[in-house]
Amino acid sequence: MKAVLLRLLLAVAVLLLSPCAHATITCTSLMTPGVSLNYQNNTTTSVQTFFAVTCTRTSTSDPVSVSYSVKADNGEYSNGVNNRGKHSDGSSLRYDFYTSSSCSTQWKGGTRISDSITWSGGSTGAITKQTSFWVCVVSAQTVTSSGVYSDSVGLTLTDSSNLTLSATALVSIFAPALCTVTSPPRSIALSYVAFGPQVSGTTSIGVTCTAGMPYVVSTDTAEAVLSGLRYVLSPGSVSSNGSGALQTHTITATVPGGQAGTCASGACNATRTHTLTISY
C-alpha cells in the first residue's frame, strides 16, 4: 500500500508542473489617441480614429495568435440614449462612438469590437495593431455656446486568456466649427536692385476661429519667381488654436540678395497673386 501511495503522489506532481513549461501570449497595452471633431451647426458629421493593442509572444511554443475584444462605456455625460460632450458653461452636444463608417451601430453597452494579432512563421516579440472606430454626430444640432465640448469614454479590453486592460478615449468637439477672415491681407511691395542685398516685406491676416479649435493658415506656395528673381513666402504654414477672438498672423516675402533678375530696361514691375487658405 505504501508503494502505491507514493506513485500516486508523484503522478499528481507531474501534472501540476506540466502547464508551467509553456509561456503564453501577453497583451500589455491598450491605448487610443481619442478624437477631435469639428462640428458645424445643423449638420451631421463623423471622423475615424482607432485604438491600439500591443501583445507579446515570447516563445515559439506559444499559440501563433491571440484574440481580443474591446467595449466602450457611455462617457461621463450620457443622457441614456447618446453620449454627450459638455461645454464649460454646462451646455452639451450629442454624439456617439460607432463600429463602422456608416454610423449605424453604436459602440456602447454590450457591443464589442473584436480583433486579433497573428505572428507569422516562427516569429516572436511584441506586435501593435490598430483597429478603427468612428465618432459620429448623427442628428443635426445647434449649439448654444461656441467652444469645445469635451467628454471621456472608458475602453476595456478582454483577451482570449481573460486578461483585462483599460484605457480612456478623450473626446473634443469644437462647435460651431468656424473661422472667418476678420482682417484680410494687403499687398506686399518689394523694391530690389540687381545683385543687391536681401529685401523683405510683410503683410498680415486676421482670423477669428472657434475657441480651442486647431486651424492652419497656409500659402499656396513656399516660393516663386518674378522677373527672374526668386522670392520666398514664410511661414509657408502656421498652426494655431482658435481663441474666439481676433488672432493675427504675419506673412513675409523675401527676395534673397545677389540675384541678377531678367529686367532688360532700367526698371521693371511684376506682380503675382497668392492664395492664403485657412484649414480647420
Image (cartoon, rainbow, N blue to C red):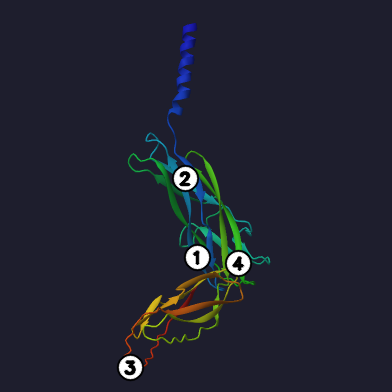
* Viewer-side residue, 253 vs 5: 253
Q: Residues within 10 Å of mark 4 (few under 14, many from 20)?
A: many
Q: Identify residue for label 1.
A: 46
Cα gap from disc 4 to disc 1, whole angstroms:
16 Å
Q: Is residue 219 visible?
A: no
Q: Tell which circle, 3 or 1, labels the residue nearer the N-terminal end.
A: 1
Label whose residue precedes the other's in the sequence (3 or 2): 2
Proximity of marks 4 and 1: CB atoms separated by less than 8 Å: no
Amino acid type for the residue under numbered disc 1: Ser
Nearer the camera: disc 4 or disc 3 = 3
Q: Secondary structure at mark 1?
A: strand
Disc 4 from disc 3: Cα separation: 58 Å
Residue assigned mark 4: 148
**Label at residue 68:** 2
Residue 96 occupies quadrant: bottom right
Furthest residue in direction bottom, as rendered: 266
